[in-house]
Image (cartoon, grey):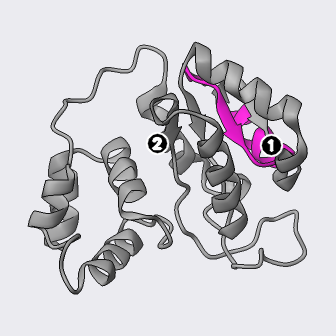
Amino acid sequence: MKMQIKYPIIVEGKYDKIKLDSLVCARVITTGGFSIFNDEEKIGLIKKLADKSRVIILTDSDGAGHLIRSYIKRALKPEQIINIYTPYVEGKEKRKRAPSKQGTLGVEGIDSKRLIELLEPFRENAPERPLNEITKTDFYKYGLSGRENSQNMRTDLLKKLELPTNMSANAMLQAINILYTREEFEKFLAN
């Protein structure tokens, strides 16, 4: 049985939508890749959806996905957005002849089990996660910000967490709070 997701999910292309439709019951909206930059009707639809409930942005972890995510984020209010980042996995989608420019898998190529894990906190009737979130102060405490080597430490941690290494510190903090409990985060730091 497919998991019911309570928020609309925005993905880049039709193959991403096909993958998600096979796994979950949700409203999945495609950006059409870079065509979103010239599609006022599509961005208008996304804004209307975000006015009714939050929206999940699930783009690829490559440069193109980052640009599309940034464009949508600029069109919406921060409280309307749930950013979910695909793991940074090297490889090539089965239907493609060659890997992407950065050589990583996109939403359509990521393991189905992993996608379900990423979306689990947003299923209908999901229990609320405890509000013991990681903060910017925690980042400083653990040396992930405000220190000479903080950028390198964040990059190393992002690699361990299989998240895109080009994330800003704020995006990283948001992703960690969506994906992990404080205890899980601290275990990653200890290893």
Q: Residue at x 49, y 37 (%)?
A: 82
Q: Quadrant of residue 105?
A: bottom right
Q: Find the residue positioned furthest to the left.
A: 141
Q: Nearer the viewer, mark 1 or mark 2?
A: 1
Please name the residue that numbered disc 1 is placed on: 31
Dot placed on the residue nearer the N-terminal end, 1 or 2: 1
Q: Is 17 one of the magenta-colored residues?
A: yes
Please name the residue that numbered disc 2 is placed on: 117
| Residue at disc 1, secondary structure | loop
Q: Where 69 falls versus 116 (above or below)?
A: below
What number of labels is visible? 2
Asked if residue 1 shows in the view, the reply is no
Q: Residue at x 65, y 33 (%)?
A: 9
The N terminus - image quarter: top right
Would you call the spot at circle 2 few (<14 residues within 10 Å), some (14-19), or many (20 or more)?
few
What distance separates the C-alpha of mark 1 from that of mark 2? 23 Å
Residue 85 spot, x, y in % from top left: 52, 53
Mark 1 residue type = Thr
Q: Quadrant of residue 162?
A: bottom left
Q: Quadrant of residue 154?
A: bottom left
Would you call the spot at circle 1 few (<14 residues within 10 Å), some (14-19), or many (20 or more)?
many
Q: Residue at x 50, y 71 (%)?
A: 166
Q: Residue at x 45, y 30 (%)?
A: 79
First to last magenta residue range:
1-23
Asked if residue 172 shows in the view, the reply is yes
Mark 2 residue type = Glu
Residue 8 spot, x, y in % from top left: 64, 26
